[in-house]
Image: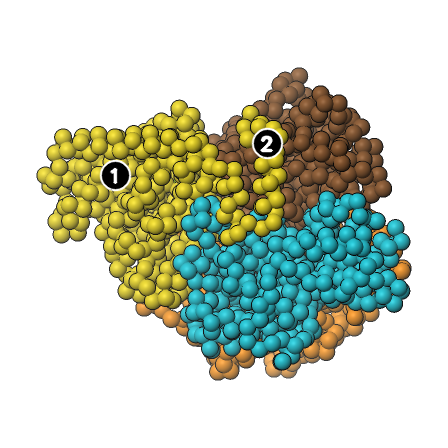
Chain colours: A brown, B orange, C cyan, D yellow
């Protein structure tokens, strides 16, 4: 089985789906000849031509707006937003249009697409190349939100997303784009959307994370193990739909939960997870659900190590939760 | 026709002359007329129906039988001239005044009225407010409220058709206010770069709610905005059905031949308030409105038809009576449906299949309704 | 003291602040000659002229974008977004620019402004004239978010917002724009931003609401009283900054909390409040914090009574929480 | 100069002729020259400094001493010609290549380098990535990454000045890629309607990262986009400092006289990669780059200065040495600061005063750092 990093896995999934389905098209800024600023679409224009791998003008609202029209007509567009931070010019098209087409037309029209975008910090990008805006989309009914943490899931989830009948926001953890390597089967890989993965079993506390922060949670769990604390680690993979059953099952067992995300704490997805857990596991909870997150500031530049909820802060939270 | 303040002595008005076909007395130069007589009569009847629908629905709104209405009184030639100039296979991306386009493309009148009522017969399942219909069978795409979002979408659909090798030209309608919006800009720009077969029809009706056209943009014409995108622009008398239809045919032919998009400015006027929620007397005078009423597009085409001796005044009256009766029957049939769609429709169509939240929340709602019937009743 | 509705109170606050401070300007679609589609700026252009009450072209990004420039230069703009549902075209200017100017320039530049916008359902507006998008802005550090429920607070909070050194999103509950009437002092009224109000004392459960839903919570509390349940009702008034002390104080007393909002449940502000309460009142909680909210769908048209978290649903939640 | 594919036989290129002043041999028609000799020499020195800064910072980035750099090599005449053509009181709304403008407006070089380092001397408190400086004392507004957001902001500032009765003209710079963005459109449109005293300078440098200008817009020139907004448009040789400066003066005078905004297209070229993160060899050939290198704006002004006998080759070399030394000293001084701003700066400036969250989170962070020093260290 070949070893890949996440970019290669994304590229592989795109290529295979484009070979399989003539309706799949890729569009965005710099995705064509250049193959994307992170090179995720490298080589695709050579193979599939300019009609199916399209360099667009510089306007995210146009990228998504035209992708909607393509999807309505029956193509399966996979638009790229160069950085998740630059998705806001397309916010109206995504929240008002993509999310609502099926609903507002009584099911007559629908515009499934996969909006791929690199997200997250840790690459010295400052606040316009580091943000994690997933909460906006999770809050918007009609959208699915998927975040892989490793190459295998990146390939399998992207493939599933492309075949999904609903629009999917596909956030790629750019901090581990190249660092996260692993074996990925050749040919079709499908990872179902909506299923979390228990990547480590434990009985003292449940760690809930996704994307780049899964790696930090995993690291913290290893360090906790050395202290005799057995942390169970969940890689959510899909934030909407959320695998609430997996979370509940784990927390009913451990009685404690720590949620980790990069986005600012207030109104981040961690709040929703905490709310759900206390609604569903109230009598089993031994400590408050604890959030280890980015702070309530714009994403900083120099102090990004301090800002990011990395393993040391997670470990501290684990210890406090277990000692509660 | 009221002119906007010129910035360069009418230069752009000369570059983009306001084309018309029907003269004030109803006559026309035969060389300018491309529309066959039977189609002219047919479109006249459509315009009459459109007017009847709009007038009746405003009445229903005043009577509290529907909550809201927004129509196209005075703009019928622009709507029907364009839709009739396209092929049946072409997709339509409406703003929110082109209901006649949906009906022209086969949406049953009763279905349209059910949409206004949001009742159990509503094809949109009561999900959308009145006048935001969709009719996929007629390739009439779902109406949205946020201004101009449909423009890049139309470009995308036309692009997709070209990728697939289909001869399909997408048409999108929008107001002159919409040309200020982001999506007009990106739509036109994307279409220009990639020579997309799309027809962008601006219903320049002089007003965006209370904002007059000269506070919307300093460009002397809307058509000249085409220059910014390297695309073809044209300006036509939007109250002259023959002129609108001819311009649409030309633009469609250009697009279909790979010559790229057209921005077609139809100069017309919003004779009524913006919608039933609006009172235009707060911001504009009667003289302007009266001047435009005299330029009514239905009267205009009517004069042409009688000049050509295609219809008699009695026939015109007959069209009106017939339309009124059709509308009456449609309202009657529509009002016979239950006032509300079933409870579960509230959760239908959010996703292809409901997620666990929607399923749980439906159960939660059912339980709440069972516990207290006021849950399902507005105060 | 004159009796006013919320629109009149907003108009009054704008007029007084414009008289007091020449730098205050109002801009937006239809706000000038027409006085706004809800008439909140009626008469202002007559009094203050076209330079200070500006009818803009139809582009929310332009309304906010130019307001930023005005604010940078030293004016105090009060842009109106005609419906909160139409704020998304301005999302990039608000989230990327307004929220970050002070931070990103190390305090050299700042663009305080008050973005007024009517929000919420119950007026048969369907999903483009009914949404409650507050969570997006609460999640964005750098913005304040204020929602009055009555004319007095509308005047007092708007006045405070205009004088605030930070940008404020000012959401006006259009469902009770005219229905909520009350006495409002003439002349200056200041209600501090960041302070919730206990509008009803009780010891069995805390109801947390704001804006139009405060009226529903209040109604539910009255009905609960008839059943012998004493509900304490908090009108949050300011969502960011949140008066967390007031919430904690009440919940420590009652041991139970019900949060009400119109926005869809998932990732709504109710999630944040639930997360905070369980973090801070864990050992005092007698039941899970319960959310009575809009459902996870676009805002519907016909079934909006069913969709809105009105008194009957709140009452049901109160009874369940008390019986937990 | 490479031409874009014309859509109408160069019609718009003729309407918006590419104005230049300095001929290839360095000579110029005295009638065209408005810039006093001493200023020409001074601006030449600024261009040399700008080039030295850019080259040195790219080196530092390659050495890992700064994380990122984006400069203006080849575009110095556009940046300095425009900023020098404005009044000191005018506000500048930069994109991200106009660092020479910040320096010209008095930002100390060492402060600029501290910003690149994000260290304890950084005026931006380490909040922004390199090259996103602000310098309020020089009315050089905070740089943002999202493309074109500064355009309506510049319009708003100029509008505010007019409301206050100040003679202030705002200038904003952006690339030709930015003309595709929403905010270019709204900014230009608002400025047109209200005749705002703003100068919109498009650095048309041929590329937006890997996207060539002809995939950005089908309009033959950028200047013609002015027509869509009813504003004045002009096209100038962006590598000719005298031409850029003269055009800026004209546009400023128009704006200040109440004649409204100008869209000034400066035709230039991005000689290097988009930024230090980019490798342009992946998408463009060397011939194009070489052709433009021969049109270097510094060489160009240098030829003029020597034609006019204003500087000798030795003096030019002296400017370079002097600039290099200034840069060297600035880097040395900047690197003497502590690598990181204090912990509490992380929470400064989110609001005028920290809310309880920021205060709590600072305490939380302090405790975490105390518990485990790795919190403050990247892996
Ligand atoms: C993004 C957005 N902003 C504001 C509105 C409110 N609004 C509805 S229609 C309208 C005016 C539209 O004018 P125009 O484009 O000229 O179309 P017309 O109504 O004249 O046909 C406005 C401001 C909206 N629907 N969407
Ligand atoms: C909204 C947004 N989308 C995408 C980007 C990524 N990006 C940064 S610069 C750039 C190209 C800009 O080209 P142009 O406007 O021509 O300016 P130039 O770099 O050539 O000076 C892109 C796409 C961004 N910064 N902001
Ligand atoms: Mg209009
Ligand atoms: Mg460029």
Quickly name the residue at label 1: D47
**Disc 2 designates what residue?**
D370
Position of residue D153 in the picture relative to residue A277 (left or right): left
Which residue appears at 58% of the width and 46% of the height?
Answer: D358
**Residue A152 at least partly seen:** no
Q: Can you give x and y, in whole percent of width and height, for residue A72 in the image?
A: 64, 47
Residue D211 place in picture, x, y as percent: 44, 38
C215 vs B291, nearest the viewer: C215
Camera-side residue: B171 or D147? D147
Q: Are marks 1 and 2 on the same chain?
A: yes
Q: Using the image as rendered, state which of residue D60 and residue D218 is in the foreground.
A: D60
Q: Quadrant of residue C247?
A: bottom right
Q: Is residue B147 left or right of residue A240?
A: left
Viewer-nearest of discs 1 and 2: 2
> Where is residue C45 shown, x and y percent of the image?
47, 74
Count residues near mark 1 (Cα–Cα under 10 Å), then give few for <14, some for 14-19, many for 20+.
many
């Amino acid at each position: 089985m070949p070893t890949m990093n996440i970019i290669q896995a994304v590229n592989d999934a795109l290529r295979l789906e484009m070979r399989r389905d003539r309706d799949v098209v890729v569009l965005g800024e710099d995705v064509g000849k250049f193959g994307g600023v992170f090179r995720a679409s490298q080589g695709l224009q050579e193979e599939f031509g300019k009609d199916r791998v399209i360099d667009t003008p510089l306007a995210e609202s146009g990228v998504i707006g035209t992708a909607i029209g393509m999807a309505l007509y029956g193509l399966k567009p996979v638009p790229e937003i160069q950085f998740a931070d630059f998705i806001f010019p397309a916010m109206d098209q995504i929240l008002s249009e993509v999310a609502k087409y099926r609903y507002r037309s009584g099911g007559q029209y629908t515009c499934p697409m996969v909006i791929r975008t690199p997200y997250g910090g840790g690459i010295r990008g400052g606040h316009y190349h580091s943000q994690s805006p997933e909460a906006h989309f999770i809050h918007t009914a009609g959208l699915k939100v998927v975040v892989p943490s490793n190459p295998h899931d990146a390939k399998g989830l992207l493939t599933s997303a492309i075949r999904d009948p609903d629009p999917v926001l596909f956030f790629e953890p750019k901090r581990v784009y190249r660092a996260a390597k692993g074996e990925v089967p050749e040919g079709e890989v499908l990872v179902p959307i909506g299923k979390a993965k228990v990547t480590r079993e434990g009985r003292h506390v449940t760690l809930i994370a996704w994307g780049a922060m899964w790696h930090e949670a995993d690291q913290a769990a290893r360090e906790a193990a050395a202290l005799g604390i057995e942390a169970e680690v969940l890689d959510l993979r899909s934030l909407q739909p959320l695998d609430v059953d997996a979370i509940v099952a784990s927390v009913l067992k451990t009685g404690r939960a720590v949620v980790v995300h990069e986005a600012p704490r207030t109104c981040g997805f961690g709040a929703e997870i905490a709310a759900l857990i206390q609604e569903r596991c109230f009598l089993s909870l031994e400590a408050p659900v604890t959030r280890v997150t980015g702070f309530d500031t714009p994403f900083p530049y120099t102090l990004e190590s301090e800002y990011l909820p990395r393993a040391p802060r997670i470990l501290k939270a684990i210890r406090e939760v277990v000692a509660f | 026709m009221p002119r906007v303040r010129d910035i360069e002595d009418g230069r752009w008005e000369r570059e983009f002359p306001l084309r018309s076909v029907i003269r004030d007395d109803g006559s026309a130069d035969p060389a300018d007329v491309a529309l066959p007589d039977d189609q002219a009569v047919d479109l006249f009847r459509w315009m009459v129906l459109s007017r009847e629908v709009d007038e009746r629905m405003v009445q229903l709104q005043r009577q509290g039988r529907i909550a809201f209405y927004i129509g196209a009184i005075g703009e019928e030639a622009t709507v029907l001239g364009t839709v009739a100039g396209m092929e049946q296979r072409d997709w339509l991306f409406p703003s929110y005044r082109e209901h006649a386009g949906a009906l022209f493309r086969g949406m049953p009148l009763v279905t349209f009225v059910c949409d206004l009522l949001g009742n159990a017969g509503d094809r949109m399942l009561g999900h959308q407010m009145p006048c935001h219909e969709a009719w996929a069978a007629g390739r009439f795409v779902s109406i949205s409220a946020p201004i101009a979002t449909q423009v890049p979408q139309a470009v995308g659909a036309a692009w997709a058709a070209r990728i697939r090798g289909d001869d399909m030209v997408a048409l999108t309608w929008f107001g002159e206010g919409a040309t200020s919006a982001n999506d007009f800009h990106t739509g036109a720009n994307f279409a220009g770069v990639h020579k997309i077969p799309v027809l962008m029809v601006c219903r320049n009706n002089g007003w965006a709610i209370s904002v007059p056209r000269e506070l919307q943009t300093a460009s002397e014409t809307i058509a000249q905005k085409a220059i910014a995108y390297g695309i073809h622009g044209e300006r036509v008398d939007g109250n002259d059905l023959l002129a609108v239809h001819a311009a649409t045919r030309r633009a469609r032919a250009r697009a279909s031949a790979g010559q790229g998009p057209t921005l077609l400015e139809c100069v017309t006027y919003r004779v009524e308030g913006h919608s039933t929620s609006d009172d235009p007397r707060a911001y504009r005078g009667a003289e302007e409105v009266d001047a435009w009423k005299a330029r009514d597009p239905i009267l205009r085409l009517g004069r042409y038809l009688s000049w050509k001796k295609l219809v008699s005044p009695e026939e015109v009256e007959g069209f009106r009576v017939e339309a009124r009766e059709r509308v009456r029957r449609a309202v009657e049939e529509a009002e016979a449906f239950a006032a509300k769609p079933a409870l579960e429709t509230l959760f239908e169509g959010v996703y292809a299949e409901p997620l666990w939240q929607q399923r749980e929340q439906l159960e939660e709602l059912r339980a709440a309704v069972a516990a207290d019937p006021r849950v399902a009743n507005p105060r």
